[in-house]
Image (tube, rainbow, N blue to C red):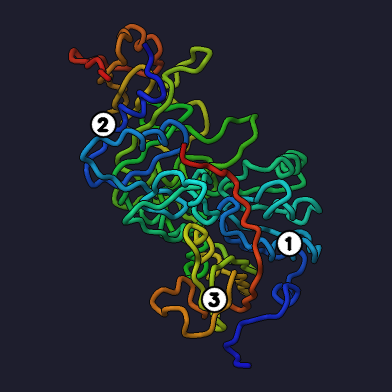
Amino acid sequence: MALTREQMAQRVARELKDGYYVNLGIGIPTLVANYVPEGIDVMLQSENGLLGMGAFPTEDELDADMINAGKQTVTARKGASIFSSAESFAMIRGGHVDLTVLGAFEVDANGNIASWMIPGKLIKGMGGAMDLVAGADNIIVTMTHASKDGESKLLKHCSLPLTGCGCIRKVLTDLAYLEIDNGHFILRERAPGVSIDEIVSKTAGPLIVPDDVIEMTF
Amino acid sequence: MSGLDKRVGSYAEALAGLTDNMTVLAGGFGLCGIPENLIAEIRRLGVRGLTVVSNNCGVDGFGLGVLLEDRQIRKMIASYVGENALFERQLLNGELEVELTPQGTLAEKLRAGGAGIPAFFTATGYGTPVAEGKEAREFNGRHYILEPAITGDFAIVKGWKADHFGNVIYRHTAQNFNPLVATAGRITVVEVEEIVEPGELDPAHIHTPGIYVDRIIQGSFEKRIEKRTLRA
């Protein structure tokens, strides 16, 4: 079975280490915050200028001056700090964020990512995505392996305008966890009950299948 | 009145000198920390042909979105403009020009503009449509593009508290782009929730020192919430 959104978030959360500063994008990445492993403390960065994002507020805590990068009302946890957008992107661009998790439309075997623009459709803007992919060393992309029409999103070359080039080395899809190295995807883990054949058939870019592909457990 | 007293008595006075075709830098992220009364005053003034630099362009009927209603904005420089149907229509009609800029690059362009740095190299956007027409250079094996700084004729800023000298502090994440645009305006106007007596703000806790600020006005704010999200 393909992973649910919650299982994808759970799998990404296993990459968290104690003491990490983490930026979570909108969608599945946001759910990762619900699965921080026991005994691990991480600080969530929100690029509008908050390090130490907490839970959503109660009615009493609701404050128009406290939002996250998705413009949702939030709270600050104990030990949080708040700063300007320039300071926030200095952290991001300067490589100080330990892990960045974000979604994409396409990723290719050279580590390119396309996530912000579909020509012919209205273009809303890249927000902070280009800064995040250019600045982070450790990025996990979360997306479905193929589109609803069955088109692979793991390509030899991205077909859409790029968000960043040569910057992605880890991809978690609903079918598999893959790494990118030297012009290839490398299959590391498969979703429970999903066959290697299915993953191969839905991966358009060059794919290496090692002997020791792990089946994920939840 | 001391020459260092930046207080003005009315919103008309706060934006005196703003004319057609000027560049206006506006603080705020989404609807959080936007100078909502100064924006409303720009609408009242009816100035046109503006270039507006702001992370977003408000929503229909609130924030910078109100300046679209009488077509006062000619060009928008922003990182994300997805919340606004009127914006979309004017963009598709060709009535409005937009220059999409990565959020961190936008913040740094303003910071650089205020700090006297004409341009800077960043890896953000290299190899993407953002890099088109820009100088690229390699440093230590990585590729970077040259991004010019931004300055404006007016900067409009929303603060929490300010003293007579224009020393400003911001509240929570309403800080965002405000201290950056404050440095990059030829005339910087700050509206705040409360003007306090000099000495009340701790000098070590000032976010925007008064040297950047030309005019201060106290206003009252709706502070509309864009995405009200509560704990389940």
Q: Which mark is residue A14?
A: 2
Residue B150, by quadrant, is bottom right
Residue nearer the viewer, A90 or B226: B226
Residue A122, by quadrant, is top right
Mark closer to the chain start, 1 or 3: 1
Q: Chain of mark 1?
A: B
State the SS at label 3: strand
Name the residue rendered at 76%, 69% in the picture: B19
> Dot 2, how many residues are within 10 Å of its Cα: few (below 14), some (14-19), or many (20+)?
few
Alpha carbons under labels 1 and 3: distance apart: 21 Å
Alpha carbons under labels 1 and 2: distance apart: 48 Å
Residue A200, by quadrant, is top left
Q: Which residue is mark 1?
A: B40
Which amino acid lies under the numbered mark 1 shown in the image of this protein?
A: Ala
Which amino acid lies under the numbered mark 3 shown in the image of this protein?
A: Ala
User: Which residue reaches farthest left?
Assistant: A212
Residue A149 shown left or right of residue A208 in the figure: right
Name the residue rendered at 57%, 83% in the picture: B164
Give above or below for B203 relative to A150.
below
Give the percent coordinates (x, y) of residue B77.
61, 53
State the SS at label 1: helix
Q: Which residue is mark 3?
A: B162
Name the residue rendered at 65%, 58% in the picture: B222
